[in-house]
Image (tube, rainbow, N blue to C red):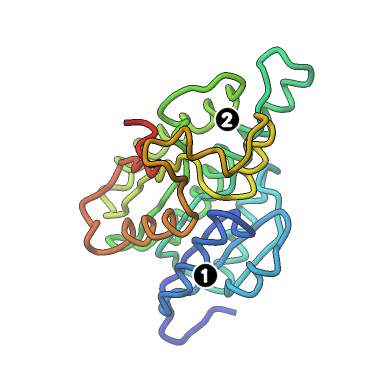
């Protein structure tokens, strides 16, 4: 049922169960003005306690993103903020056995899901008010051995961001990317372990000597959707402690 009362601005965040996604959900809810919807393959208790609407779905499956947005629109017809955050990261050499499935999974989750969710949302975005954010990576700006699929997907997401910003500019809808470096998340811990390292050792590769906290990424997202950032579109803001400097 559509809410007929004065509706709160709607924020849609994919991949909200943990890490950056959960920090985004909690940061927008903490503002006290937003109605927040999120989805994830597995719904954590933290996400269910934080968001106004949650849905379990695998965005790598064609049509899942469209179904998620349809479910959101059934409750709230307008979307103020869309944040494409869902993603996976797995290291694998290009010649590894089963590489086709690895590439297909990476592109489906990291790139195609953002396209499908965004396209399904276009009719609900508010002209002159809405904002779209893609959560990419510093690997949208450089390469890394054994991360070919991930780099290709994140580079593609950055190109999508820039082109879509131009396409939606006449409607006054802004599109930007946030490119985090190492962030203190479970995904980072898993990647560090695969490299024979740990989260505690990751700051050694960061000029500022510390990795990013998920809440810092969320704070940057809040800035990008605010009125003071109304002239920022088509940009990729790196938050990496100087890693790409």
Q: Residue at x 47, y 38 (%)?
A: 137
The crowding category of the residue bearing disc 2, from other C-alpha atoms within 10 Å (few below 14, some 14 to 19, many at least 20), is many
In the depicted structure, whether residue 86 falls above or below residue 107:
below
The crowding category of the residue bearing disc 1, from other C-alpha atoms within 10 Å (few below 14, some 14 to 19, many at least 20), is many
Q: What residue is pinned by disc 1?
A: 36
Chain-order first, disc 2 or disc 1: 1
Along the horizontal axis of the image, is 17 left or right of 3? right
Along the horizontal axis of the image, is 236 left or right of 20? left
Depth check: give the residue in front, 180 or 173: 180
Q: Residue at x 41, y 50 (%)?
A: 133
In the depicted structure, whether residue 76 falls above or below residue 90:
below
| 2 and 1 marks in contact (CB < 8 Å) | no
Residue 227: x %, y % from top left: 24, 64
Along the horizontal axis of the image, is 167 left or right of 73? left
Instruction: Identify the image quadrant of the N terminus.
Output: bottom right
Instruction: State the image quarter where residue 123 is shown.
Output: bottom left
Residue 206: x %, y % from top left: 43, 36
Q: What residue is pinned by disc 2?
A: 150
Q: How many marks?
A: 2
Q: Residue at x 45, y 31 (%)?
A: 140
Instruction: State the image quarter where residue 149 is shown.
Output: top right
Residue 15: x %, y % from top left: 60, 54
Q: Secondary structure at mark 2?
A: helix
Q: Secondary structure at mark 1?
A: strand
Along the horizontal axis of the image, is 163 left or right of 145? left
Q: Residue at x 53, y 52 (%)?
A: 120
Instruction: Identify the image quadrant of the C terminus.
Output: top left
Residue with the most extreme right position:
97
Depth check: give the residue in front, 183 or 162: 183
Distance Cα–Cα, label 2 vs label 1: 28 Å
Residue with the most extreme top position:
95
Q: Nearer the viewer, mark 2 or mark 1?
A: 2
């Amino acid at each position: 049922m559509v809410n007929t009362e004065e509706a709160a601005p709607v924020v849609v965040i994919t991949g909200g169960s943990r890490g950056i996604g959960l920090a985004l959900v909690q940061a927008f809810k903490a503002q006290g003005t937003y109605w927040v919807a999120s989805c994830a393959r597995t719904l954590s208790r933290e996400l269910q306690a934080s968001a106004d609407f949650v849905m379990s779905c695998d965005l790598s499956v064609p049509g899942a993103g469209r179904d998620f947005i349809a479910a959101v629109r059934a409750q709230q017809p307008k979307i103020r903020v869309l944040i494409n955050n869902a993603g996976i990261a797995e290291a694998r050499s290009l010649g590894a056995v089963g590489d086709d499935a690895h590439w297909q999974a990476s592109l489906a989750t990291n790139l195609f899901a953002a396209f499908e969710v965004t396209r399904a949302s276009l009719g609900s975005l508010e002209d002159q008010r809405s904002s779209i954010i893609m959560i990419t990576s510093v690997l949208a700006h450089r390469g890394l051995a054994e991360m070919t699929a991930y780099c290709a997907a994140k580079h593609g997401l950055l190109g999508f961001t820039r082109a879509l910003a131009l396409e939606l500019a006449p409607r006054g809808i802004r599109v930007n990317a946030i490119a985090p470096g190492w962030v203190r998340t479970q995904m980072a811990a898993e990647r560090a372990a695969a490299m024979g390292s740990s989260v505690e050792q990751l700051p050694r590769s960061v000029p500022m000597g510390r990795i990013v906290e998920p809440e810092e990424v969320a704070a940057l997202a809040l800035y990008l959707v605010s009125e003071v950032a109304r002239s920022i579109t088509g940009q990729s803001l790196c938050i990496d402690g100087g890693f790409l400097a």
